[in-house]
Amino acid sequence: MFTRLSDVDRTFSLMDELRRRMDRGWDREEAYAPRALSQPTWPLVNLFDTGAELVLTADVPGLAEKDIKITLDGETLTLAGERQIAALEGATCHRQERAGVKFSRSFSLPVKADAERATAEVKDGVLRLTLPKAPEARPRQIAVRTS
Amino acid sequence: MSNHTTLGKDEKAAPERVQQRAVTTPLVDVYEDKEGLLLIADLPGVTKDGVRIELEKGQLTIDARRADPPAGTLVASEYRAVDYHRVFSVPRDIDPAKIDASLTAGVLRLRLPKSDAAKPRRIEVRAG
């Protein structure tokens, strides 16, 4: 009895497997499209809140300040630029993991920032963007009066 | 935010260095030409003092430590403050005395020149 049931199970699982393989076949075009042409997520960022300001850090090894265009439009922050990795002339390449990338990433900031006083620096391959919060977004202390 | 506690341990008191941070493999490019090997590694957030390169028994080890993240509350996170670690086997004909490393903008360039004996050479034919 048990043997028979497992036989049925096996048949069905084979059919499932067949269907899965066929589905994969149809999707092949999409699944194997070169990824380099699409926009990878680069650079990766972290956002910190220090109370009075927002600090955004991004890993941009090999880039300088001039390679990154930073725009702040209202609460939308955009980082754009290009990282070029040139292959070495006259040398054999054994391994290439670092890739050039043309990037443009936009972020919605949680609060309004003061674009006039924003500062950006690139140090040791890390972009550090300091965005002071707009006065109305800053935390404030409320004094409690005793009546 | 006012009662800030430092949870770090006293390094001198600890007999064993406990790994507290996550470790990742950095991305590298490896090239070879007549002069030797050139290894380029992305080490964002690492300063000159934070990187340690060792060559022992034909194994090249790169260890790098990221600088600490800025103060403040982490609102959105896509990466962590990790340390980098990667080991390569290098050919025996590398001259250990001539290895040169430089770190600019978070990119490490490590030049591993071949010893003179291993370099390709052209033999002149004398007319006898």
Image (spheres, coloured by chain):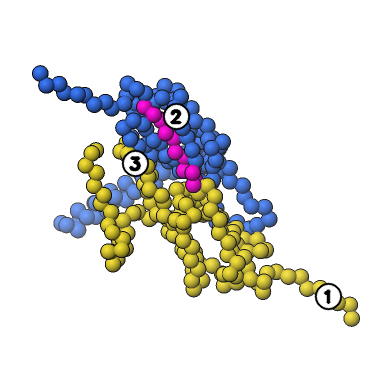
Chain colours: A blue, B yellow
Q: Secondary structure at mark 1?
A: loop
Decide if residue B54 is on the left or right side of residue A89: left
Q: Residue at x 34, y 26 (%)?
A: A111
Q: Quadrant of residue A130?
A: top left
Q: Is residue A39 visible?
A: no
Q: Name the mark nearer the viewer: 1 or 3.
A: 3
Q: Residue B30, relative to residue A65: is it above or below? A: below
What number is the disc on residue A118?
Answer: 2
Q: Residue at x 34, y 48 (%)?
A: A17
**Residue A5 at x, y percent in the picture:** 19, 53
Decide if residue B79 is on the left or right side of residue A11: right
Q: Amino acid at mark 1?
A: Val
Gap between marks 3 and 2 measured at Cα: 17 Å
- Tell me the chain of label 3: B
Q: Residue B122, relative to residue B28: is it above or below? A: below
Residue at label 3?
B71
Decide if residue A21 is on the left or right side of residue B1: right
Q: Is residue B17 visible?
A: yes
> Which quadrant holds the N terminus of chain A?
bottom left
Asked if labels 2 and 1 touch by Cβ distance under 8 angstroms, the answer is no
> Reading the chain from its start, which is encountered first: label 1 or label 3?
3
In the depicted view, which residue is nearer to us: A102 or A114?
A114
**Numbered range of the magenta stretch:** A123-133
- Tell me the chain of label 2: A
Asked if labels 2 and 3 touch by Cβ distance under 8 angstroms, the answer is no
Q: Name the mark nearer the viewer: 1 or 2.
A: 2
**Residue A109 at x, y percent in the picture:** 37, 28
- Tell me the chain of label 1: B
What number is the disc on residue B125?
Answer: 1
Q: Quadrant of residue A112?
A: top left
Q: Are marks 3 and 2 on the same chain?
A: no
Q: Amino acid at mark 2?
A: Ala
